[in-house]
Image (cartoon, rainbow, N blue to C red):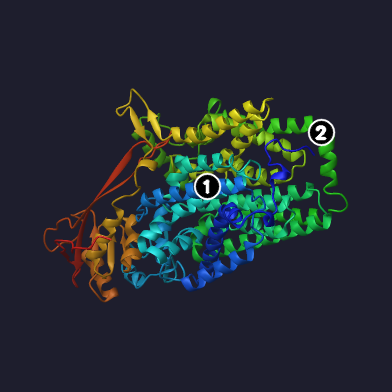
Amino acid sequence: MSASPVAAPASARTNTDAVPMAVRVFGALPERIVLITVGVALAAGLLVTVGAHYWWTVLPAAALIITVAWRAATPRDVTVRGAIASAIAVGGAALWAIVNLAMHAEYLLVVRDPGFLTLSGLWLVDHGSTDIPAAGAVEAAAANGNMLADASEAWNLKGDVVQPQGAKMLPATIAIGGWLAGETGVLSANAVIGAVGILAVFAVARQFLSPMAALAPAGALALTVSHIGLSRPAYTEPLTLLLVIAGILWAWRGVAERSIPLLTLGAVASGATMLVRVDGPSFAIGAIAGVGLALASVEADPRWRRSAALTFAGWQAMTIGMGYLSVALWSTEYLERLADETHALLAVYAVLVIALVVWSLMWTGAPGRWIERLSDAWGRRGAWIAGAVVAAGLAVLASRPLWTTVYRSTDNPRHQFTNGVVESFQKAQGLEIEPTRTYAESTVTWLSYYLTWPIVILAIIGFGWATMRMVRRDAPWAVFLGAIMAPTLLYLWRPSIVPDQIWAIRRFEPATLPGFILAAAAAGWMLASLARKESVRAGLRRAVGVGMLVLPLSTWISISPDAEYPISGAVNVTTREMVGARSQIDELCAVADGRPVILASDSSHYGSIRVTCDVPVILHLGNPTEAHLAAAYEAWGEAPVVFTRQGDELPWTEEAAVVVSSRVTHSAYTLQGIPRTSMVRNYHWYAGVVTPSGAVEPITAAPSITAP
């Protein structure tokens, strides 16, 4: 097996006992921070699954996980240059975190997923689970068919509790920020997770690049608009990215260092994606396939390889099972809505687990004999042909806008809703009206919005090169390709998402974007190594490193001479998302003043009021009559407050006036590029107190509140 042209030489890997303490500490710092963050998130996700999410349970559990994994996760390459590069990486990630903490979103309205995820995190600051008591809302809503004790898909009634949609690891993790810094801590915690994801990319990159060179892909991720824009609000993707990349790191090292404890860590990290997202099996599928191929081909004792494969499969399957149980218990209706997709992924995953178990039991003698024979038969030329086939396949996917357009159906109710949303975006942007167009043919183009085409092209070359290395039995590359390519190919072909940015790039944030960045770095350094003179090679590598930083940075600015604003910036970088929502909810809570709330025709604020104001809420669809309101008054046994944005839809005792006015700003919805403009939502709220007869006495002025 030939040596990799980008791998660090064996002589660069120094025994930890032969270097000073400071070098060992700084050299290991990125991996330590990754381990600590994953350990805390895992403890939070597991304990919220059993309804015991409290500081006095989560923090000791996290300490136990970290302690058990500490020695295994210690990196072996602890050179002086490695320590310097690690210090730079940690310093850069810390600076990135500080900036994005200051620019955190105020996603307290359920306009999109970060709304209910943030609110779930706020609830978990003081509660052991995300089940929210209906607190009499069920009985009050029973008075009329137009009244609901829950709201839309984000808040689902189960018995006498309301369940927020989605898996629970992210809310449980950002709630830890609330223990440290209150509401601001919850709102900003995801930025810390995003920063640790950058360190995870650095740690993986230095498995095949020099430590200094590994700074380039880490910096590239840090500068992508997508990673910045998805880390400021509470999107699940940065935490999923951290788990996917940490899983690659530990599984790669586990194969390379023949370490079952490291493979166990990789299994748990990749399996824990199910605790974050209901499509977590798509990431676990790639991880187990890649690890299976790596263990089949690595040169090691067959008994060790068999034990490693069974251990990986067992721990990963156990973690996937915990994730499924968590969603089934705490977001039951959400899982039922996505049952077909989820169970299909789980079925594929189960087949792969069984296949790996059966296959590993047949491993005897020399490692992966048929793989060895196949690799020898193909030779170097065959390996390069395999790599070329992979690269060509990705190039074909990139070319799809030239020869196809993908459409969705019109008979599925969910598709009908999406068609209406897409049509509204097309009209607003002056595009051709094609409501059923999915834009799925442009998924590689979406990547170019954030990475630019040079990096995408380099990545395609890099995946081909990595395939060649895998076929030549450089086993760790199988780990990388499996973990990255499985979810990447799935979502490049069928993203199944509303295609506006930055919403749509969520599909590619956890695995594809960091995977493309790492593959581009590998390709860049490989191509540079082809130069004969060392001075030329060094210059080319510096050029690749600088390019990987400058190219994502270039996407922050757009120059269009014919546009109304010729120079525009990426608003997900330059502005805070949903600014104004926090003060609006605080004012509404001050008006409610601890009383039950009837929310007329505005489901986006249902969870905001229930969680932040901590009062029972019912949603009224339509115009409530005096009879409806009187029945709610009787059911609650006290006078509720009614909120409405339509001043003429309630039976007022006198003319009502606006009591809360608010402007909330967020990035615009764009179908063919990074958002360059913001949009403003104006809110004007009327409020009144329900009398026993059902008439509503207007509240004429909001109480004064102290700014947080």
The foreground one among 264 and 181 is: 181
Spatial CA span between label 1 and label 2:
39 Å
Residue at image point 73% right, 40% down: 470
Image mark for residue 89: 1
The foreground one among 593 and 606 is: 593
Q: How many residues crowd around disc 1 within 10 Å: few (fewer than 14), some, or many (20 or more)?
A: many
Q: Where is residue 128 in the image (x, y as percent from the top left)?
A: 46, 71
Q: Residue furthest left?
A: 654
The amino acid at mark 1 is Ala
Residue at image point 53% right, 67% down: 49
Q: In which quarter of the image is the N terminus?
A: top right
Q: Residue furthest bottom?
A: 637
Q: In this view, does 314 lie to the left or right of 21?
A: right
Q: How many residues crowd around disc 2 within 10 Å: few (fewer than 14), some, or many (20 or more)?
A: some
Q: Where is residue 571 in the image (x, y as percent from the top left)?
A: 36, 40
Q: In this view, does 422 lie to the left or right of 640?
A: right
Q: Residue furthest top?
A: 562
Residue 362, above or below 436? below
Instruction: State the SS at label 1.
Output: helix
The amino acid at mark 2 is Gly
Q: In this view, does 58 lie to the left or right of 572?
A: right
Q: In this view, does 316 lie to the left or right of 415?
A: right
Image mark for residue 379: 2
Q: Is residue 480 visible?
A: yes
Q: Where is residue 513 in the image (x, y as percent from the top left)?
A: 54, 41
Which quarter of the picture shows residue 584?
Answer: bottom left
Image mark for residue 363: none
Residue at image point 60% right, 43% down: 211
